[in-house]
Amino acid sequence: MPVIAPLYLRWLLLITTCLLLTGFITPMLTITKLVFFDHSFSILSGITQLWRDQHYFLFVVIAAFSVLLPLAKVVVLFNLLSPKAHQPEHRQKLLHLMHDYGRWAMLDVMVVALLIMSVKLGAIASIQVHLGLYIFAAAVILIMLITQQVVRHLD
């Protein structure tokens, strides 16, 4: 008999996906350099700028851990919450994958990226936080909570 996840988890994941996508494009920070030059950026504009500036390693790390892995985790969660029957082995493999690698997907690397940027700027710039950072953080926390609920439900 298939395991059917509660409807509220599917709705919450849909809302969380919207928050995550909004967090990717909504400005997170404004950097003011020497009082005169302001530059606001979102996650997507930030990684695009890393590519343009030829910081390929940072581009790959931040794009992979802040964009690709969170999206992959959402896809896996939608798959696990699907009303279609799954083979128990497949479900266990997905749960194990999310448990082992899901923690690295978002929060740690985002914090490290902000720290790197802050240290590089030093005293020549100030940073103002915007709504995008809070939206992205809310999506990250909700994905973690949904993952916990899905694992608890399917175990």
Image (spheres, rainbow, N blue to C red):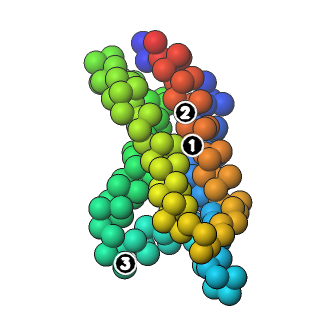
- Indicate which disc residue 144 carries: 2
Q: What residue is shown at x 43% (from left), y 75% (from top)?
A: 49
Residue 46, image x and y in percent?
Answer: 49, 69
Residue 96 appears left or right of 20: left
Q: Nearer the viewer, mark 2 or mark 3?
A: 3
> In the figure, residue 59 lies in which quadrant?
bottom left
Furthest residue in direction front, as rendered: 123
Q: Is residue 1 above or below residue 4?
A: above
Q: Nearer the viewer, residue 7 or 30?
A: 30
Residue 124 seen in this snapshot: yes
- Residue that carries the numbered disc 1 in the rendered image: 140
Q: What residue is shown at x 35% (from left), y 73% (from top)?
A: 51
Residue 131, image x and y in percent?
Answer: 71, 60
Residue 110, image x and y in percent?
Answer: 50, 51
Real-space CA distance between mark 1 and mark 3, rounded to the nearest whole angstrom: 27 Å
Residue 39 appears left or right of 1: right
Q: Earlier in the sequence, mark 2 or mark 3?
A: 3
**Which residue type carries mark 3?**
Asp
Q: Is residue 127 above or below residue 70?
A: below
Residue 17, image x and y in percent?
Answer: 56, 48
- Indicate which disc residue 53 carries: 3
Q: Secondary structure at mark 1?
A: helix
Furthest residue in direction bottom, as rendered: 36
**Which residue type carries mark 2?**
Met
Q: Is residue 7 above or below residue 124?
A: above
Residue 18 seen in this snapshot: no
Q: Secondary structure at mark 3?
A: loop
**Which residue type carries mark 1?**
Val
